[in-house]
Structures are given as C-alpha cells and as structure tokens.
Image: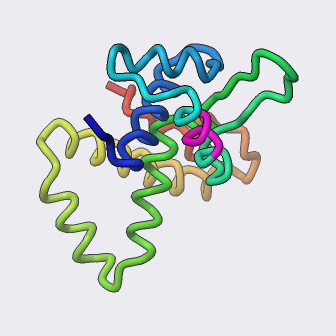
Amino acid sequence: MPRDRGQLEADVMRQLWAADQPRTAKQIQAGFGPDAPAITTVLTVLDRLRRKGLVHRSDARTNITFRAAQSESDRAVESMLQSLQETGDRRAVLLRFAGDLDSSDAEVLRRALEGRTRRRSGAGRSGGSGSGAGGSGAGVSGTDT
C-alpha cells in the first residue's frame, strides 16, 4: 500500500518522539512492521527531515543515529503559532480554536492563562529579582492539576 510522503515523514517523527534514545535507520524501518518501507526510503525521509531542521543526525561514521530536534509538544506549539501568524484575523482564529476545545482542554488552557497573568503581575511587584519560580513562562506543561 503506497504512502503519501507527508504521512511517511509523520510516521518517522512519531517513532523518534516515542523513542527514549536516538535510533538508527534500521530501527526506524523495523518500527513500521510488515509494511516497512525500503531502507533507502527511510534514509531519504530522514535526510529530508534533517534538512527541514526536524531531525538531528549523529556525527558517527558507523551506526549513525537520528533523534527529533524538538519534542512533539514543542513542534505542535511552533506549528500553531506559525498558523496564527499567517492568518488575517487572529481574534477569529483564537475564538474558534477555544470554542472547539473539549471541556478538559479548555480547563488546561484557562489554568495556563491564569498562571501567565499571575506571573506577569507578580513580576512587577517582586522588586525585579527575577528569582521566582516559573518566571520564564515555561511552567505551562499541562501537568499542573
């Protein structure tokens, strides 16, 4: 069954994101199971992903490994922000996006926005030390339950 090139890239990225360590092209190929593409196809996809900045390749001469350049969540955020920048009506897109969220996702987003507001207002009153927890804005991971 032939695959769309974009689908093959997405499948390779899913494998790299799921891996706990860098993987060789043969390991990635094996991850496809019985419908695995040829090793040359896997290598071509990995090279395309590398040129796009999505995959890092090891410098080893033998046993070359590949890993995702960023986490799956970071990639999703980048994609969402890029889409938002490219639209003519950011407000309409944000309202539609928020309106289409299920209740649990909407609650995660609400808490993230509240935390962002608290950090910003707290930073102005802290005396400028900048040593408060979460001051970088990186504390919104969806794990604050």
- In front: 71, or 59? 59
Q: Is residue 67 above or below residue 6?
A: above
Q: Residue at x 46, y 21 (%)?
A: 18
Q: Along the horizontal axis of the image, is 81 left or right of 56?
A: left
Q: Along the horizontal axis of the image, is 3 left or right of 28?
A: left
Res 10 visible: yes
Q: Along the horizontal axis of the image, is 133 left or right of 7?
A: right
Q: Residue at x 42, y 77 (%)?
A: 86
Q: Residue at x 67, y 52 (%)?
A: 51
What color scheme is it? Answer: rainbow
- In front: 4, or 134? 4
Q: Position of residue 92 (x, y in %)?
A: 22, 76
Q: Is residue 23 above or below residue 76?
A: above
Q: Position of residue 131 (x, y in %)?
A: 72, 38
Quadrant holding the N terminus: top left
Total marks placed: 0
- In front: 117, or 13? 13
Quadrant holding the C terminus: top left
Q: Is residue 120 above or below residue 69?
A: below
The image quarter containing residue 7 is top left
- In front: 132, or 36? 36
Q: Position of residue 129 (x, y in %)?
A: 76, 46
Res 136 visible: no
The image quarter containing residue 50 is top right
Magenta highlight range: 43-47
Q: Position of residue 9 (x, y in %)?
A: 46, 42
Q: Along the horizontal axis of the image, is 107 left or right of 51?
A: left
Q: Is residue 102 magenta?
A: no
Q: Main secondary structure of the magenta part?
A: helix
